[in-house]
Image (tube, helix red, strand yellow):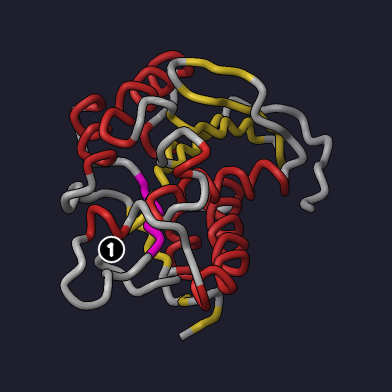
Amino acid sequence: MIKMDTAPETSSTYLIAGLGNPGREYRDSRHNIGFMLVNRLAERLDVTFSRLESKALVTKAKYQGRSIILAKPQTYMNLSGQAVGSLVKFYKIPLENLMVVYDDVDLPFGKIRIRPTGGSAGHKGVASIIDQLGTQDFPRLRFGIGRPPGSKGASSYVLRDFSGDDADFLPHILDSGAGAVITFITEDLTTAMNRFNSKINGEVE
């Protein structure tokens, strides 16, 4: 667990939005890795999700003078922008202080890719956020989940639970992702990109 310090609060507020689908049936699915990441961050920051706000489960933490809002939109994936857009507007979050975390079938399993901008690449949750914010210029962290073997469709694959070696590696990958987000908050986006974009399965390539 990260040790919380008592540095005075500054005006720096960060919103970390992990994307996923609400409900027990989706809890451990590949599509919910964004939820898993903000859950891991909540554990490390010693906070719990206890309130529903702007159509999202939200919790707040203070760390090294920064105010951190962790959010899990409860709108289902395709309407994630409703929650993220509302939170950005309500808390007046500068877009450079927003990070959206989600799954990417076009990256190998375990690969972390942080970028300052970009399109949705077909991810409907990200498309919804771009639509609500009116821009694609916001940081994002993508977790590679790989493509399904053979001719299986990606839409059903992402809703299946992690299994086998993937499930075994998942805690390490989430720890890496949590470290990347903390680096983004306490240092900067470029440092987080340089430090974590070269990692796969929690290790340097």
26 vs 204: above or below: above
- The quarter of the displayed image where residue 174 is located: bottom right
Most extreme residue toward the bottom is: 205
Q: Looking at this view, is 174 or 164 the one in front?
A: 164
In the image, 41 versus 160, the foreground residue is 160
Is residue 198 rendered magenta in the image?
no
- SS at badge 1: loop
Q: Please state the horizontal and vertical placement of residue 159, each as a whole percent of the image.
A: 35, 51
- Residue 140 belongs to magenta span: yes
Seen at 60% across and 59% down, the residue is: 179
Q: Position of residue 139 (x, y in %)?
A: 36, 46
Q: Is residue 51 left or right of residue 141?
A: right
- The part of the chain drawn in magenta is 139-144
Above-or-below relation of 151 to 78? below
- Give the residue displayed 51% in from the left and 45% down from the top: 27
- Say above or below: 16 vs 11: below
Quadrant in which residue 130 is drawn? top left
> Could you say which is closer to the camera, residue 128 or residue 85?
128
Reading the image, the residue beneath label 1 is: 105
Residue 6 on image: x %, y %: 83, 35
Percent of width and height locating residue 140:
37, 49
Q: Main secondary structure of the magenta part?
A: strand
Q: Is residue 25 left or right of residue 104?
A: right
Category of crowding for the residue at label 1, using alpha-carbon neighbours closer than 10 angstroms: few (below 14), some (14–19), many (at least 20):
many
Q: Residue at x 16, y 72 (%)?
A: 151
Name the residue rendered at 32%, 41% in the picture. 138
